Image (cartoon, helix red, strand yellow):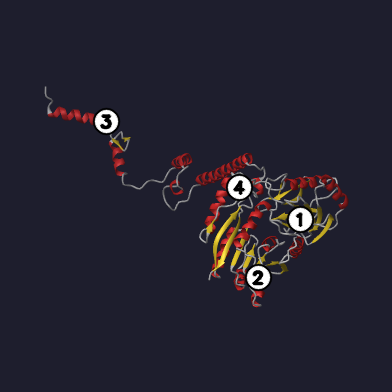
Amino acid sequence: MRETEKNKKKRMDAGAKASKPVRDGKTFSDKKALKESKSSKGSKPLKASKELKESKASRELKGSRGLKESERYQGDQSSKPSKISKEIGRDKVKDKEKDREKNKEKDTKKLKKKSLCPVSARCGGCQYLDMPYEEQLKLKQAQMQKLLGKFCGVHPIHGMENPFHYRNKVHAVFGHRKGEPVSGVYEEGTHNLVPVESCLIEDQKADEIIGTIRGMLKSFKIRTYDEDTGYGLLRHVLIRRGFTTGEILVVLVTASPVFPSKNNFVKALRQKHPEITTIVQNINDRGTSMVLGDREHVLYGKGYIEDELCGFRFRISPKSFYQVNPVQTEYLYNKAIELAGLTGKETVLDAYCGIGTIGITASAHAGQVIGVELNPDAVRDAVQNAKCNNIKNIRFYCNDATKFMTQMAEAGDGVDVVLMDPPRSGSTEEFIRAVASVKAKRVVYVSCGPDTLARDLEVFKKYGYQAKSAWPVDLFPQTYHTEMVCLLSRRA
């Protein structure tokens, strides 16, 4: 039977009363609530209640990791983060700092486990020690190409067959820990003493002698020097060993000329190490970082040693400059003489000549050689070296090389070739101008600082000199230092 219109209307009204309207996911039990919901749709949000604020803070605590700072505090832009949020932020910063410290400790422990040297991380002297030697050479080659490739061709680097224990000069700082004498090196960039028993790039016999001296101090009641108080006697020990001759020079650097029981000390040291050729006391009473002082007393032997290099014999005293890697130095100097293009007629000026090693090596191929050096001790050794090797065509002058060349130019004199081996800080524009003033046709620049070499090549270009070729030599394996010899020619 069909439902009448009246009955159908009654049934629908009854169903509407029984159901609860739904809006935005909420149900409303009566028309009044529904009406209030409709009227509040366009109104402004009410301020959060205390419970709402707390729930918001808890949400931020759970879900703020990975959010941007601006997304953590939604709402009015001018409002400041709550105290709870500030504390949460501070806690997170502290947590991150703790994590970083833990990671740093882990990295240090890993390095200590993996490193060939237990103190390499603190010493800082062998930056490439744990890198395979072939990789070291590739890295240095790339660095030299980047620095000098724009000036001239860079030839393949000359490496070593055995890149360990090559240093013929060893220096140890002495101090004390808990009443016990220690020796080693300063931590990189500080004056914190890092105890070192042995070093993978230093002469092994030198390390052994330093250990013996350290062990003798207590029995002879010799105190090590304290930089902070100024008390104590022994500051440093410097050892130089002739690579070819095997002669050994030991320099005891003391804070005072008064050395109690020095004769007995020297005798005991010689008994333990009869291979020692000479022992010198150097007095350094200055409060500076300089290792050697001005005064010296020879305690045993001649006060110097001799070594052979490039077929010549050289005298080496405590203050003399002598390359620390004799094996690589021989290649370096022979390459420098080759690049100079000497025919036996040229006048060669050896600037920064030291004890005359490069100049004396060049003398066999030149007409005459002039050596100029500011260090009087080195000049004395250079003169003796020339006599010892019976060199007649070389003369040495104790002078500043820049002033010397300027005076030569003023007198109308010139040179054909300038050999220069400046310190790591490089040369100066005044020096380069002086080279130009003596009209040198060629310049052979030996550099232990390729970055300053690159800087100086720019200046040389300004004065009419063009770099022709550069030859890297790995004089300092396991470190980031590279020696370089570069040929420059004067443009017509």
Measuring from the top left, give residue 346's x and y in whole percent.
64, 68
From the image, state whether disc 1 or disc 4 is nearer to you.
1
Q: Which residue is mark 1?
A: 306
Looking at numbered disc 3 in the image, what kind of residue is underneath it? Answer: Ser
214 vs 417, left or right, is right
Q: Which residue is mark 4?
A: 128
Question: In the picture, residue 407 is in which quadrant?
Answer: bottom right
Crowd rating for badge 4 (residues with CA inside 10 Å; few <14, some 14–19, many 20+):
some
| Marks 2/4: CA–CA distance | 37 Å
Secondary structure beneath label 3: loop
Question: In the picture, residue 421 is in which quadrant?
Answer: bottom right
| Marks 1/3: CA–CA distance | 112 Å
Q: Is residue 425 above or below residue 106?
A: below
Q: Is residue 462 visible?
A: yes
Q: Which sits earlier in the primary sequence, circle 1 or circle 4?
A: 4
Q: Is residue 291 above or below residue 121?
A: below
Disc sitting over residue 402 in the figure: 2
Nearest the camera: 104 or 44?
Answer: 104
